[in-house]
Image: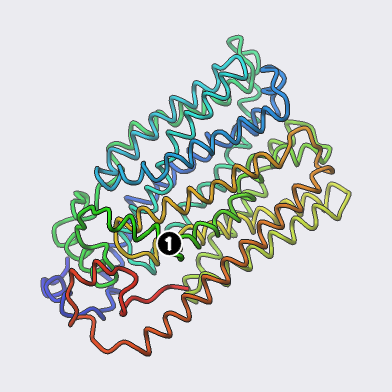
């Protein structure tokens, strides 16, 4: 498919466009293998962590004799476990194989999700939520890292946006499923909320078994590509970044990630957005039910806001790709979400408040989709990137813990004023962090443009690899 000279010459020419019709066919082939299965796994992951919000409306709190504060604790301890195990999970991924590791995680959390429907008391609920957090922790940072070894930097954010769109689709899909499964209340002597966990968990287990045969391995060993396609893929990656090289694991790169202020910036940016992402996804059924709608209507009425969020994600990703910008769109998404929360706070009737839910969902999910792809585009060094992505999710999800504790299920939608104000504060914090990253990286790019004195091909590959994104020829994507 590809001429041999394209493969041989990439080390001499780092300015080749790599945007030929053959390259586009190669990308479509990679997309067809990665995006459907990985997006599906994330959809199931988000479904299995957030369906507790749907189960609550179907009687989980009443049947397990759980108070409002204890329900919040059950939500929060999931994220505590998630935070603790994210970085170790990505280190395991780096040492082993995504083709086994990601489906294995899916299988285990699917089994745990089924067990959520078998608990009979609050102690069992707390324990099973911890296990769910442990088993789901490695999927998202793992997939983001896998994307980084298949796509060039400018190609990743669109794929991450499609992938993260699975979270929005999970919300819409979950609302419909929860309504339909809730009709099984009493079947087999089990409550409707129990069937929500059991059937959705079984779906995850079934998909995970097929995923062992579909999830790809590392790009340098990808068997779904021909030899010439694989060589071309690695050539594209090497000309763009470090992803085409086989980097040996060294603790030096781990320390490099931990001491980089930009890595911490990406992490705190997600911290601000994670608060609103998870509080909104976990409490949206409660917020809508609090507007005066019956439980079954509230389940179905979660579908339109998530559908709007999914389309908003994909439109913003297209806009970002067209104009090659990230920070301005992340900031704009936060502003849209803030407007949504202001509408929720200042209006009293269900109609306008429901519009506010749509605006909040669109802004929150869109901002998260773009900011989660940012580190994988700007952190160079495979191990550093793996740790940096995991750090972003880990510190970000501490914000999720806060969101779970601030929003109380005993409150009605009209009494969520204080939590909504706190959500606005977190979004404003996210805007400040995004502005800092934007300013610092743009200034650093300008400095490097002024000070560079050598051509990229004149540099030592090993030295460049070790410097990573600190190298004089490296340019950040802002």
Q: Position of residue 435 (x, y in %)?
A: 58, 71
Q: Nearer the viewer, residue 283 or 357?
A: 283
Residue appearing at x 42%, y 39% in the figure? 85
Q: Is residue 133 above or below residue 145?
A: above
Q: Residue furthest top?
A: 189
Q: Secondary structure at mark 1?
A: helix
* Number of callouts: 1
Does residue 438 appear to the left or right of 469 in the view shown?
A: right
Label 1 Cα neighbours within 10 Å, binned few <14 / some 14-19 / many ≥20 = many
Q: Which residue is mark 1?
A: 375
Q: Residue furthest right?
A: 348
Q: Quadrant of the N terminus?
A: bottom left
Does residue 28 appear to the left or right of 279 in the view shown?
A: left
Does residue 84 appear to the left or right of 415 in the view shown?
A: left
Residue appearing at x 64%, y 21% in the figure? 192
Q: Is residue 199 above or below residue 16?
A: above
Which color mode does the image show?
rainbow
Q: Position of residue 56 (x, y in %)?
A: 68, 28
Residue appearing at x 69%, y 17% in the figure? 63
Q: Position of residue 236 (x, y in %)?
A: 25, 69
Task: Say which quarter of the image contains residue 333.
Answer: bottom right
Q: Position of residue 461 (x, y in %)?
A: 18, 72
């Amino acid at each position: 498919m590809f001429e041999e000279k394209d493969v041989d010459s990439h080390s001499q020419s780092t300015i080749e466009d790599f945007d030929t019709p053959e390259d586009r066919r190669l990308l479509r082939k990679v997309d067809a293998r990665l995006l459907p299965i990985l997006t599906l796994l994330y959809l199931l992951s988000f479904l299995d962590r957030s369906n507790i919000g749907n189960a609550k409306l179907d009687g989980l709190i009443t049947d397990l004799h759980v108070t409002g504060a204890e329900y919040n604790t059950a939500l929060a301890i999931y994220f505590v476990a998630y935070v603790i195990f994210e970085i170790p999970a990505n280190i395991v991924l780096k040492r082993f194989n995504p083709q086994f590791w990601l489906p294995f995680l899916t299988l285990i959390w699917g089994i745990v999700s089924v067990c959520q429907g078998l608990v009979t008391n609050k102690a069992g609920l707390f324990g099973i939520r911890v296990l769910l957090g442990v088993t789901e922790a490695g999927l998202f940072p793992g997939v983001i890292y896998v994307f980084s070894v298949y796509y060039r930097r400018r190609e990743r954010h669109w794929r991450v946006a499609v992938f993260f769109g699975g979270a929005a689709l999970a919300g819409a899909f979950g609302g419909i499923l929860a309504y339909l499964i809730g009709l099984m209340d009493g079947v087999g002597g089990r409550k409707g909320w129990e069937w929500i966990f059991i059937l959705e968990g079984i779906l995850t287990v079934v998909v995970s078994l097929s995923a062992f045969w579909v999830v790809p391995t590392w790009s340098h060993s990808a068997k779904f590509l021909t030899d010439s396609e694989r060589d071309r893929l690695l050539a594209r990656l090497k000309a763009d970044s470090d992803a085409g090289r086989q980097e040996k694991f060294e603790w030096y790169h781990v320390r490099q990630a931990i001491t980089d202020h930009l890595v911490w910036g990406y992490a705190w940016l997600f911290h601000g957005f994670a608060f609103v992402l998870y509080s909104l996804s976990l409490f949206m059924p409660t917020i809508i039910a609090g507007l005066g709608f019956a439980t079954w209507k509230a389940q179905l009425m979660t579908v339109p806001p998530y559908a709007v969020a999914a389309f908003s994600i994909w439109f913003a990703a297209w806009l970002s790709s067209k104009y090659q910008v990230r920070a301005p769109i992340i900031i704009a998404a936060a502003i849209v979400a803030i407007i949504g929360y202001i509408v929720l706070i200042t209006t009293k009737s269900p109609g306008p408040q429901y519009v506010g839910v749509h605006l909040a969902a669109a802004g929150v999910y869109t901002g998260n989709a773009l900011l989660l792809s940012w580190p994988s585009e700007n952190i160079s060094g495979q191990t550093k990137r793996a740790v940096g992505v995991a750090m972003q999710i880990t510190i970000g999800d501490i914000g999720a813990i806060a969101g779970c504790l601030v929003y109380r299920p005993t409150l009605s939608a009209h009494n969520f004023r204080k939590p909504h104000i706190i959500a606005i504060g977190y979004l404003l914090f996210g805007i400040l962090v995004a502005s800092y990253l934007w300013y610092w990286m743009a200034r650093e790019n300008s400095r490097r443009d002024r000070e560079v004195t050598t051509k990229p091909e004149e540099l030592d590959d090993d030295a460049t690899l070790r410097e990573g994104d600190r190298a004089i020829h490296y340019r950040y994507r802002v």
